[in-house]
Image: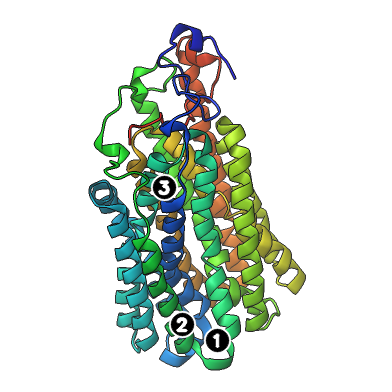
Amino acid sequence: MTSSSQHQLPSTGPVLAGRSASAPASGAASRSRWGRLIATVVVTIAAVTPGLMAPALAAPVQRSLHLSGTAFGAAVTCFFAFTAVGSSAARRIVPRVPVRAVLGAGALVAAAVLAGLAMAGQLWQLCLLLAVAGLGNAFTQPVAARVIAADIAPRRHSFAGGLFGASLGAGPFLPGLLVALIAAPYGWRPALWTAAGLALLTLIVAALARPARSGAAAPETRRTPAAPTGRADAPSPRTVGRVVSAWTAAAALGSVGTNVGAAYFIQIGTSSGFVAGTAGTLQMLASVLGIAVRLGAGVLADRAPHRIPWTVALMMLTGTAGLATIVAGTPVSFLIGALLAVAGGWGWTGLLLAATMRLLPGESARAGAAMQGGLFAGAAVGPLSFGALSAHLGIPATVGIAAVGPLLGALLLTVGIRALAKDAARRPAAGASEPMAAIRADEPQDR
């Protein structure tokens, strides 16, 4: 793709379709190293497992501990709420701490929390443990954004974001597997002990997450000459701030509904006519499909980065359609709706991270923290509201209310896209030729 700005500004032209006009055809900046990102994905799955195992085991835990749906929902909310609250601190800490240390701490916290949950006997213990797990989980998305910016070539950022997003897609797989194979025949405590053991194994993966090159610095620790305000086609800082805020709010609204579908998949499935073991198997199927959607969408998005926000909006609308289908309350409607809601409607997380990183070149930790703050702030609303509303309105009606969230999220994404287009229209021809030129990959960094 070419534009007039490439001729006017040969050294700092826009980055379109994930490429830099000044990037060499080969060299360190054009090569991707995937080891640390894969390690980050594995540890992220472990870090998010406590927040998904708890609602997957909602029915037996509530019966065993004599908890109401509202009380149990409040405990699960602690995980998502503390992830959102901790994102701000994680944004400041992650650039200053070695990646291996962050990942190792996250794996250790997840294993300890899952073991604690297996021994818990009171509500306050559930709340405290899930809050600690949420704080540990808060570091995963900022560290993933840091690794993507440092180790992955800009032209592959969307696929890298999809690969990290696959960790959220894989998140429901382990709870579904453990419910089907262990919780159903042996009980919920053995299932949590097994999850704790698996989380502990991810410490090995964290230890192997070495920098691509010795002495590699985090991209945030060095300021590159090509800041976004230094290009004629770049959106104004005010516009960037407004768009990041709009997309953060969109992530929050989108996750309100889709998190209900993912976290309470088994409970919704049993209310639709499936037994717990079958619902767990379906959750695993939805998780695998969600991983495939994230990876496939990432590959396609790298070919046209300026279309990523529109793709995210379409996925949110898919989530709305899936949740609305579940409302019918039949096994067939649940099967179709849940697959749409979890696989398609929850597949946009990595893409939105990649789009925000392109909007904030050189500020990957800020991009990761903004998106994680939005995602988990919205996710925190789901468990508490689901427990309270489903007790009075029933599960189908509650799922129908949740469907409004991703619909509003898609509208907010459109607001951000239009703001970028209006900003481009006010700028010289260098930016006007590509309204979405602001959605770009990070400039190649000296790592």
Q: Position of residue 61 (x, y in %)?
A: 46, 86
Which residue matches tag 2?
A: 194
Which residue matches tag 3?
A: 371
Looking at the rendered structure, the kind of residue marked 1 is Ile
Q: Position of residue 135 (x, y in %)?
A: 31, 63
Query: CA gap, disc 2 to disc 1?
Result: 9 Å
Element under disc 1? helix
Q: Sequence order check: which comes first, mark 2 or mark 3?
A: 2
Looking at the rendered structure, the kind of residue marked 2 is Thr
Element under disc 2? helix
- Which label is found at residue 182? 1
Nearer the viewer's eye, disc 1 or disc 3?
1
Q: Quadrant of residue 215?
A: top left
Looking at the rendered structure, the kind of residue marked 3 is Met
Q: Position of residue 157 (x, y in %)?
A: 49, 39
Depicted 105 relative to depicted 186: above or below: above
Contact, CB < 8 Å: mark 2 with mark 1? yes
The answer to which of 255 and 10 lies nearer the viewer is 10
How many neighbours does mark 2 have within 10 angstroms: few (below 14), some (14-19), or many (20 or more)? some
Residue sitting at the far right? 332
The answer to which of 446 and 293 lies nearer the viewer is 446
The answer to which of 372 and 357 lies nearer the viewer is 357
Depicted 332 relative to depicted 404: above or below: below
Query: CA gap, disc 1 to disc 3?
Result: 34 Å
- Which label is found at residue 435? none
How many neighbours does mark 1 have within 10 angstroms: few (below 14), some (14-19), or many (20 or more)? some
- Residue at horizontal 35 percent and vertical 89 percent from the top: 121
Q: Quadrant of residue 244?
A: top left
Element under disc 3? helix
Whether residue 394 can be seen here: no
Does residue 27 appear left or right of residue 322 in this picture? left
